[in-house]
Image (spheres, rainbow, N blue to C red):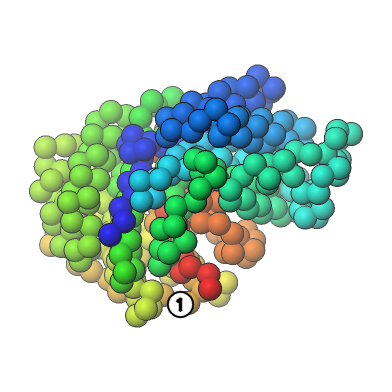
Amino acid sequence: MLLSLGGSNRPGPFLLVPISDPSRVGEARRLAVELARRIGFDEADSGRAALVATELGTNLIKHARAGRLLLGLRDVAGAGALEIVALDDGPGMADAQRCLRDGFSSAGTSGTGLGAVRRQADDFDLHSALPQGTAVLARLFRGRARPSEWASLPLESGAVALAAPREQVCGDAWAMAFDGGGATAMTVDGLGHGAGAAEAARAALDAFAAGPAEPPARFIKRAHLALRPTRGAAVAVLRLDPDGGMVRFAGAGNVQARIVSGLGSKTLLPQSGTVGVQIREPDEQALAWPPHALVVLFTDGVVSRWELEDVGLLGRDSTLLAAWLAGRHRRGHDDATVVVLRRRKE
């Protein structure tokens, strides 16, 4: 079984840098190098990280409204990856593929920005819509060596956690466990935000790591005991069975899950209560999981009535989509987390 834990400093929330002037590009570059070295990138790989952050940030300054960079770490089977996402609020690209070609520029420059990012990244994805804006993902692995387990997982997944403004720690967290029969995913939103919320989130991550494959309702009961010494949290857990085409869900508090496809979406709602404080006997919901549908878990730092403005987002990298939702639909004064899972493309 492969286990991935994120948020609450495991390996930590994404860092959000508003790219409002050229000095913020330098800040993003320094943060990218710091994160890269944290997971063992050598000088050459750290240089790739610096170049990607610089090119994406510079592109936002020249072409975008309300540009921001999200920088975070990913761990799969003990192999670290650096993920950098550029987001903006427009104007978008009329021809995204043309903008990727070296030599193309709409600002009188050499036109190597996005092309250089794609060459330096080990995984690259881009979505742009008029007039909503653009999202660009660059994922970098140490030594450009993608772990073999990455491609063999039964599901594609991505997650973004963002701390509340002016907070040093994130009170949200997420976790995923992959096995031969599918996957289990959890989100947790510690009550309030700041250090006390992060402590509750860590307790939920510890509980998940101790038994990630158990049925969702049973996990909620166990997490309730584990979180008793903390202020408590909202917790939701999903068990996904790609072969049987089912999703099983249990949760308590202000966390939700949605099954989203081009035909619409269905919402899985938790029961009321706070895990670690007071909950009813957990119940479990089951819904069909259509072959081309996504499963999205999110905390209440993301508005509950979000919609995918462009159906093309359904086919994008899971981390890019998680960043799009967390970055564009977050509430202003809370931690925000989005986890996206889909069946692996054949």
Q: Quadrant of residue 307?
A: bottom right
What residue is at 62 percent from the left and 50 percent from the top? Answer: 124
What residue is at 22 percent from the left and 50 percent from the top? Answer: 209
Which residue is labeled 1 in the image?
Answer: 290
For the N terminus, the image quarter is: bottom left
Say whether residue 186 is left or right of residue 90: left
Q: Residue 241 location, x and y as percent?
A: 34, 73
Q: Considering the numbered disc 1 on the image, is that residue within a helix, a strand or a loop?
A: loop
Q: Amino acid at mark 1?
A: Pro
What residue is at 14 percent from the left and 50 percent from the top? Answer: 224
Q: Residue 238 location, x and y as percent?
A: 31, 63
Q: Residue 189 location, x and y as percent?
A: 31, 44
Say whether residue 64 is left or right of residue 235: right
Out of 260 and 25, give the one closest to the viewer.
Answer: 25
- Of all residues, the one furthest to the bottom in this rendering is 244
Q: Residue 188 location, x and y as percent?
A: 30, 47
Out of 264 and 92, give the one closest to the viewer.
Answer: 92
Q: Quadrant of residue 115?
A: top right
What residue is at 26 percent from the left and 41 percent from the top? Answer: 201
**Is the residue 44 above or below the residue 130 in the image?**
above
Out of 197 and 120, give the one closest to the viewer.
Answer: 120
